[in-house]
Image: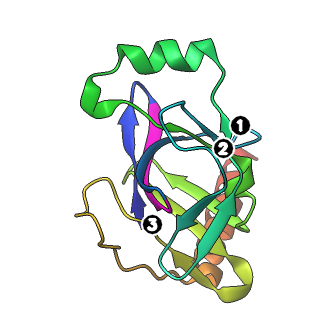
Amino acid sequence: MLEFEIVEGLAVVQVRTSTGYLRLLADTGSNATTLNATTPPGNLVIKLRDYELLVKPYPTQTPVFDKFNATLPKEQRLDGVLGQDFFSQFSIVAFDYAHHQLILAHRSRNTAIAIPSMNSSPGTVPEAGLDLHGMAAQVDASLYRQRSRSR
């Protein structure tokens, strides 16, 4: 699975793209992917294990983001925000905070995919595979147990 790093309480991923590796804030609440001024403009191909996904990033024009980024140590600075235009290309997006794992999956393919982790060497991609039906059954059972206890 994709590992993410917590930076000031926020999930940060490193993705391999058509312009090289980028450190992006994983923000499911952001409508679009945005990149700072130092990143070349234009379409961005995000390269995953078996996929290449196209996003059309906007320039980051949020003073709050720029101010936040400036407070980070140089090695933790961000290249932008990974938003809904990326995440909406998957049927399942799950953050496993206990293990710092980001799961991206297509329900129809019954497999999860991974993108390079923060701790991987450049050019390596961790192995991924997930039984989504089994995961859904575990989640359903867990929710059923929680509902039963609260009655």
Identified by mark 1, the residue type is Ser
Rounded to the nearest whole Å, what is the CA distance between mark 1 and mark 3? 20 Å
- The reply to whether residue 40 is visible in this rendering is yes
Of marks 1 and 2, the one in the foreground: 2
Range covered by the magenta-colored residues: 10-18
Q: Which residue matches tag 1?
A: 30
Report crowding for label 3: few under 14, some 14 to 19, many 20 or more residues within 10 A (C-alpha).
many
Q: Earlier in the sequence, mark 1 or mark 3?
A: 1
Q: Which residue matches tag 3?
A: 115
Q: Position of residue 104 (x, y in %)?
A: 58, 66
- The reply to whether residue 148 is visible in this rendering is no
Residue beneath the point at 73% across and 49% down: 84
Residue beneath the point at 39% across and 51% down: 100
**Front residue (pair 146, 97):** 97
Of marks 2 and 3, the one in the foreground: 2
Quarter location, residue 131: bottom right
| Residue 85 to residue 64: above or below | below
Q: Secondary structure at mark 1?
A: loop
| Residue 13 to residue 122: above or below | above
Q: Is 149 on the left-hand or right-hand side of 11? A: right
Residue 93: within the magenta? no
**Front residue (pair 45, 92):** 45
Q: Are marks 1 and 3 in contact (CB under 8 Å)?
A: no
| Residue 129 to residue 75: above or below | below
User: Dividing the image into 4 quarters, which one contains the N terminus?
Assistant: bottom left
Q: Which residue matches tag 2?
A: 33
